[in-house]
Image (cartoon, coloured by chain):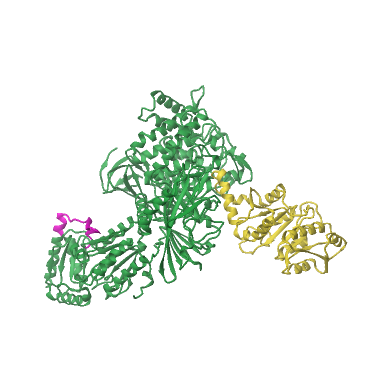
Amino acid sequence: MLTFPAAVRRRFEAIVFDWDGTAVPDRHADTTDLRRVLEQLCTHGMHVAIVSGTHLGNVDGQLGARPAGPGTLLLALNRGSEVYVVDRDGPHLLDGRVATTAEDHALDTAAVAARHAFAARGLRTELVSTRLNRRKIDLIPEPDWHDPPKADIDRLLDAVTARLHAAGIEGLREAVAIAQASAREAGLADARVTSDAKHVEIGLTDKSDSARWLLGFLQREGVAPGTVLIGGDEFGPLGGVPGSDSLMLVAEAARATVVSVGKEPAGGLDPVVLLGGGPPRFGALLLDQLERRRRGALPEADEDPAWTIAFDGDAERERAVHALLTLADGRLGTRGPSLVSSATAPPAVYAAGLYDGEGPETTLLACPVWHQAPHPSTSEATLRQVLDLRTFVVHETSNDAATIHRAVRLSSVTRPGAVALRAECARGAGSACPPLLAPTDGRAAEEGSTDGTAWMRIAASEGGVTAAASQRVYPAHRDVEVLERLGVYAADPVQLPAPDAARGRLVDLEQAGFEHLFHEHRRTWAARWEDAYLGIEGDPELERSARFALGHVLACAPDDGEAAVGARGLTGPAYRGHVFWDADVFVLPVLAATRPAAARAILEYRVRRLDAARAAAGAEGHAGARFPWESARTGRDVTPQSASDRTGRVVPIRTGALEVHVVGCVAWAAAHYVDWTGDRDFAAGAGARLLAETARYWASRARRTPDGRAHLYGVIGPDEYHEPVDDNAFTNVLARWNLRRAAALDTDAITATERDEWRRVADALVDGYDPATGRYEQFAGFDGLEPLMIADVSPRRPIAADLLLGPERVRAAQVVKQADVLMLHHLLPGEVAAGSLTQNLDYYEPRTAHGSSLSPGVHAALLARAGRLDAARELLGLTARIDLDDLTDTTAGGLHLAAMASVWHALAFGFLGIRPHADHIELDPRVPSDWSALELRFRHHGRRITIRAEPERLIASADGPVSIVIGGQRYRVDTSGLRLMLRGSGHWRPTAQLNEEAV
Amino acid sequence: MTTVLAAIDDSNAADTVLATAAALARLTGARVKALHVREDGVERARAVTEAAELSLVEVAGDVVEQIATAAADPDVQVVVVGARRHPEGARPAGHVAFALLRRVRTPLVVVPPDTESPATLERVLVPLDGTMRTARRAHAVIDLAATAGLDVIVFHCFDVDRLPMFTDQPQHETRAFEHEFLARYAPDTPARLELRVGTPADEVLAAAQALDVDLVAIAWAQILEPGRARIVRELLARSRVPLLLLPVDHEDSDSL
């Protein structure tokens, strides 16, 4: 077999190619071998797409392939007007462009006019009108040139050119120009005029439409453009007209590898790789791809900087990199590379909700390790790791002279709990490592092996985890073999699963195989991004960082059951996996808008701990439900009572006892989820219970004073520098909102007496608002503290002001750790005094140290709302880099999931001004002038909505009718979209009035 | 066999220098070589050496030159010198110690005259500035001390100019920071970490006293120009326990 250039000596995930002249020499050629190769490529997971100007009968009739998958065979035919998928039952139309009667008439008119123009020059032509959505004008209707083979393209071109010259027409380019002019005159503004030398065609579509459709399909399959191979035979110009295959080189294909097997008489076209050799050479290329897959070639990353994050060996940061590259599927989190292992940076696996220990010592259980490849090197200095953000697959390459060269691994989001690894090893090394290793914490693991399947299980204080894994090793080529490992985890917080619980699922995995798991995993991720697309045009680094943050948030929870989303998710051991308000008010909103089922799982975690919260309230002498500041398995508070701080002092930790706003945060999360999703069952059932029980807590905890006012004494607000405080504005206003929202519930489970009482308490609750200043006092007495601007004591922010000034000074000063009053404006903008953001932002922001990683993202959102876009961008940029730059020196312990979620908050709630309501979405975009566009996609009440905001233009679209309110105007938006322009008055006005309706 | 070179003068400081050298030698299994450069007397030096059952090598010439020459012997593992002759008050190191600090690439222990030299070293404080460069240099000491059974306390002080941005939840955050700091800068050792906030020299001195350490080991770049090595200068002036100074390469030595 002839060798190929380096550009194609690798595995591709999809191949898109021209039919005539590329795959077959003519329409009568035997395709037996081609059919077999294409079917087998699909069997091995490759997507195959044929692009042709001709119709189904010609291509399918000649090829006759009937692939079984998992790779898809697509036929993009009729010059961009139809797409068929072919399976074992034959071809099925997936999409088609149907010309309107007017378009058909215009095509006829254009063709007749063009023929008249040619005839006027003395050129006899013939019209072929039977093609879908196009008219073909035969420039050389001679018997000798009735059906010329592609191999005769040179002679054909010479003959046509001579004929055109005889008519005083310069060549094909002028012939095409004549047809284009005719099309325009016929009213076809976007006609596609092409030529294959013999014909000039006037159509509604061309191969560029095929290419765009196919690349869109591949994107939805999770196939990155850089892993696509495009093949053709006519990329270079033909008679001065762009080669027909050059139309496939659309913008979406910019990262694809392109090869030509044609003669390319005028030379190639950058960046086409010229292979030459015609269909036989192309057949060899297909065979080469098939052979690579048979040998277990590893999928390769498309290192598109917009969608990948790469790390080269860095001994100092290795543990932080492990966290950054965690692969999570909502149930399982895997960190640490496969090719390298060191005692100071051990690999780790965690299972969601699986804890060990009691009380404050409750911690995530370390699970068996599945992903360590044999004979790993001990130095990460030689390692390159690439995280593909599209699919959350990690690609590793080692340049160490060790026994392992490359590895690819994934944690299946299609089958949470299932994992897969494929690695290239030196011959003989593949089977040297058991598929499961005990975690490095020294905990006893029970293990065994049955029928080639290894299993290992570890008991927690209650329940435990059982993992099962199998591997196979097969030769790749002379010195290299492939190790393929599949694993399954069964985690149960109540009962230690039996080995069969995991082994049974492993059988299904083995039947599916690595390629199938890889295939479905990337497709599931593609579907997630389809609902959660994020683009920041004009700031590529921020865009990538934001996608990185969003991707990890999308990965943190499953679609069913309950989700115990700890402060660091499943990305590391820090915070012991304890669940804070981070999950309810930071992570949940992102998921409610992009993965509603995952948001529901977060709420289910609280719902299932409602009894524990009731018991906690009762123990405090209160009614209702008192959710804990830190929660783990049982739902009882697991906040430590004391801890050493960085000054070396042991300090009491009072958040567990006093930071009660978490109660209202759980209620807010439930309501917010309903606003996004319209989930009626939840709203009427578990959601109502959460709101009612939290309201009962507030009603019983509030204390009335003789003046009739209600107070919440002895709490800690989000600003944890001050403790305890009375009447914290955030806590009180949140409680007030909680009481009123619960009182408005339509349920028999709340008595009329309760409703009345809740409303009375809500009305009486002190909120610290001063109408004269438009400002909320953060808590009773805050205004009397030492006035202190952070800029006066520190040249920079964020700054841990408690360490800078000492806890006593910050307690006595107007120094704020994180958004407190302002958190109200972020979470409950409708519950605070209208127009009070500016006053409170002016007052509190300079006093805020941003000493919590939760603070800058929220402030970025609020600054954007206030139109202070430069300041907003600065804090947004910082938030997006907290873990990527390890700004805390603790990323090694896991990612700051809530801060990552706040990146999305800043973009969605801040810059776009999105607010979900029961019957509409509210928008108020404010986009920096140097961002060409901010684009987000999300779901509201089941409808997928895309918002593209440019500094002075807004485009909104939805996959079904939705209501969007902008500047007080309600618009009905659907697939046809809404376009608004920002007028000089600062108001958005439609560029085309589409379905506007008055409020 | 490796050597601990004890450079003693003819003052009372000779006792503590020799005692410190002996303690270090026991730790490493080295022998003590006592060196005296004759200046204005030799009786005290001879007496303390004899009491320690060691022989004294006496040489003549420039003191710094002679000690530096002896320290260049590949067998010399560490050089022990007195900080200065007299104990009173906080003062800079004497001219001999000061000159050796910059010249000798061998680890140098500077013994204050008023130190209470223990018969054995039990606890060592290793201040680290949070860079790999100093950590690498200190690692051998940490490893050796830990292997010898010493209580090794790694120490890190957040200078007010380098305070962390965030403290989040201190009940978890401090532990996460400590875990990573030790993994990065003192891996594979049983060292424990003490954190402080403040002026590093002050905090090192305070911790050395509060934690009752016998030795402070610190890496530095041997640059004593104005504005540099503030911590080392302060420790030399004020420490009441011996300082083990570990030279590191000069690059990127702003913090030292």
Residue A661 percent across, percent down from the top left = 49, 36
Q: Say which of A433 and A56 sits in front.
A: A433
**Quadrant hosting residue A478:** bottom left
**Quadrant hosting residue A482:** bottom left
Q: How many marks?
A: 0
Q: Which chain is represented by green in the image? A: A
Is residue A95 a member of the stretch shown in magenta? yes
Q: Say which of B51 and A168 sits in front.
A: B51
Q: Is residue A329 visible?
A: no
Q: Say which of A398 and A948 sits in front.
A: A398
Left or right of B23, for residue A409 = left
Residue A539 percent across, percent down from the top left = 42, 56
Residue A211 percent across, percent down from the top left = 28, 61
Q: Residue furthest top?
A: A706
Is residue A59 a member of the stretch shown in magenta? no
Position of residue B26 relative to residue A673, above or below, is below
Q: Say which of A52 and A806 sits in front.
A: A52
Residue A693 percent across, percent down from the top left = 43, 31
Q: Quarter of the image containing the N terminus of chain A?
A: bottom left
Q: Which chain is represented by yellow in the image? A: B
Q: Quarter of the image containing the C terminus of chain A?
A: top left
Q: Is residue A697 visible?
A: yes
Magenta residues, start to end? A79-106
**Quadrant hosting residue A39:** bottom left
Position of residue A335 relative to residue A825, above or below, is below
Left or right of A792, for residue A566 = left
